Amino acid sequence: MTGIFISFEGIDGAGKTTHITRLHEHLLAQGRDVCLTREPGGTALGESIREWVLHRSVATATEVLLMFAARAEHLEQVIRPALAAGKVVLCDRFTDATMAYQGAGRGVDMGFLRLLAEQVEAGTRPSLTVLFDVPPAVSRERLAGLKAPDRFEREQSAFFERVRAGYLALARAEPQRFALLDASQPMEAVTAALLHVVSEHLR
């Protein structure tokens, strides 16, 4: 059996995590066998790395390598076994996040990131990537209420402008894989659009 791999992307504050949870519940109610996971994270090692990169100061090169180390473990321990079992894998961020955040956002060489991605992914890529797009001003407003923002959430608007531009460039380069959603709409409208996109993909 071969499952279906769907990733979810967007700048911080786009609301994707809320909508992934709603989608997960919707698919379970339909009787789908679903694996809900996230990056960095998804494994014991990945969750430890998540703590480091979100809450501790590390060099940019270290940040990149830790992200890919977590991804390698995630693929080996969670994603590939779930796909082999025929499950629908819903992943909150994947390699596109690294391209957008570390590449476009922090200025890491894209060629270097693509080389790492090719080696780590070894052909395991999402068949659908849902990009929740919001202007950074909307993102900042939504993040303003957080009591303890992480390293990324504390970044300035210019950083999120670069990240958003990076995401949109990725979507333009692979329109057959990306579904672009206007996440500045009311929550119910975004959820409805998400359910439609995913249901069409799963037909």
Image: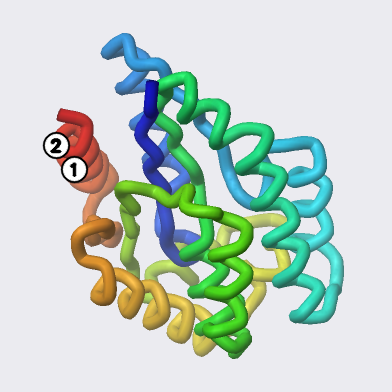
SS for callout 1? helix
- Judge whether 144 appears above or below 94 on screen: below
- Judge whether 170 appears above or below 158 on screen: above
SS for callout 2? helix
**Side (left or right) of 43 relative to 131:** right
Q: Residues within 10 Å of mark 2 (few under 14, many from 20)?
A: few
Residue drawn 43% across the image and 41% down it = 18
**Kind of residue sitting beneath label 1:** Val
Report if residue 155 is visible in the image: yes
Q: Is 175 or 166 nearer to us in this picture?
A: 175
Give percent across and percent down for residue 188.
23, 40
Residue drawn 41% across the image and 16% down it = 33
Give percent across and percent down for residue 92.
50, 46
Quadrant position of residue 148: bottom right
Residue that numbered label 2 is attached to = 200
Residue that numbered label 1 is attached to = 197
**Side (left or right) of 36 relative to 78:** left
**Kind of residue sitting beneath label 2:** Glu
- Judge whether 190 appears above or below 166 on screen: above
Dot label at residue 22: none
Q: Residues within 10 Å of mark 1 (few under 14, many from 20)?
A: some
**Side (left or right) of 155 relative to 13:** right
Quadrant position of residue 195: top left
Q: Quadrant of the C terminus?
A: top left
Report if residue 181 is visible in the image: no
Give percent across and percent down for residue 79.
55, 36
Quadrant position of residue 154: bottom right
Q: Is 181 or 168 nearer to us in this picture?
A: 168
- State yes or no: discs 1 and 2 in contact (Cβ < 8 Å): yes
Give percent across and percent down for residue 87.
42, 23
